[in-house]
Amino acid sequence: MGIISIENLDRLYWLGRYSERVYTSARLFATSFDRMIDMNLDDYAQFCALLDIPNIYRSREEFCGRYIVDEQDPNSIYSNLMRAYDNAVELRNEIGSEPITYIQLSVYDMKKSKLLSAPIVGLQKVIDNILAFWGIVDDMIESENVRNIIKTGKRIERLDLYGRLQVDRTSIAREVHRLAGRIQRTNLHYDREKIEELNRLVEEDEIDYDRIVELADGVRTD
């Protein structure tokens, strides 16, 4: 596939981040939606706080509608999916047509969800298509560097989200170790000292989750 331009290195990285953001946000939303139905009508406020997005929603109903499919909401699942799609389309030479198809299918399913009285119904199809996209990345993309850059973006995004959500030590340590092993196999510039600090942090008695988020977002240096 030849030399990858700096612009497309960045697109590959953000394709990984945005696809992971869509996947995890959709899963988290489904869990929060269940809580709002069963117990806590205002759970969406905590959801926004955990993910550090502005709570611009006036009610549970508005949140459930806008957060999934509102293209004018920059933090919506739909908006992040379109960012993934925009990057994927520009990377046709690097990743091929088949991986893009699954991002396109996610967009199609998301647009169909806008027409439903309960947009959450379409989210499972989006989740399934993102999982299929990652599988095709492994199976169809010949360039190891391209695969590793996408997966590095994916791991950094997941680590960022796990830090914000303060997940259990085992899960967050696993993501740190996966990131450390993956990023060194790319030609991305990164801060090795931050990787070493991440490895130390997950071994401490009390994890500094804020520092985890800060380090994850600062690992890449170009």
Image (spheres, rainbow, N blue to C red):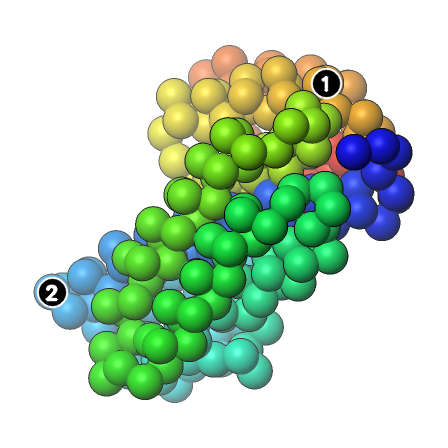
**Residue 87, horizontal then vertical, whole percent:** 68, 56
Q: Pointers 1 and 2 in contact (CB under 8 A)?
A: no
Q: Is residue 117 left or right of residue 136?
A: left
Query: 72 or 95: which is nearer to us?
Result: 95
Which labelled disc corresponds to residue 184? 1
The image shows residue 15, relative to residue 41, as above or below, that is above
Going from the N terminus, do you reach mark 1 or mark 2 first? 2
Q: Residue at x 71, y 18 (%)?
A: 185
Q: Quadrant of the N terminus?
A: top right
Query: x, y (%) of residue 154?
Result: 57, 39
Which one is closest to the eye, mark 1 or mark 2? 1
Which one is nearer the viewer's eye here, 141 or 27? 141
Instruction: Provide the secondary structure element on which disc 2 rests.
Output: helix
The amino acid sitting under disc 2 is Asp
- Where does the C terminus fall, quadrant-wise? top right
Q: Secondary structure at mark 1?
A: loop
Residue 16 percent coordinates (x, y): 60, 43
Residue drawn 36% across the image and 29% down it: 168
Disc number at residue 38? 2
Quick check: 218 left or right of 15?
Answer: right
As shown in the figure, which amino acid type bears the numbered disc 1? Gln
- Label 2: how many residues lie within 10 Å, few (<14), some (14-19) or many (20+)? few
Inspect this view and state whether residue 212 appears: no
Residue at position x 11%, y 65% in the image: 38
